[in-house]
Image (cartoon, grey):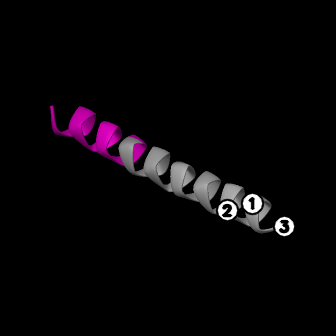
Amino acid sequence: DEAEERADIAESQVNKLRAKSRDIGTKSLNEE
């Protein structure tokens, strides 16, 4: 159970990072 929970946490962190980089990408595109 604990390992599964850690996997869920890691997955959500990855999703947050992806969302952040997506935001950064769209912002830099709009600024140019």
Q: Which residue is drawn at 67% across and 62% down?
A: 6
Q: How far apart are marks 3 and 1 (CA)?
A: 5 Å
Amino acid type at image mark 1: Ala
Q: Give the range drawn in magenta.
A: 22-32
- What element does badge 2 sit on? helix
Tell me if label 3 and label 1 are in contact, CB under 8 Å.
yes
- What element does badge 1 sit on? helix
Q: Is 17 inside the magenta-drawn segment?
A: no
Tell me if label 2 and label 1 are in contact, CB under 8 Å.
yes
Q: State the residue in front, 3 or 10.
A: 3
User: For mark 2, what is the residue?
Assistant: 6
Amino acid type at image mark 2: Arg
Q: Is residue 14 left or right of residue 20?
A: right
User: For mark 3, what is the residue?
Assistant: 1
Main secondary-structure element of the magenta-colored stretch? helix
User: Extreme front residue here?
Assistant: 2
User: For mark 1, what is the residue?
Assistant: 3
x and y, in percent, of residue 2 in the image:
76, 68
Q: How far apart are marks 2 and 3 (CA)?
A: 9 Å
Q: How many labels does the image show?
A: 3
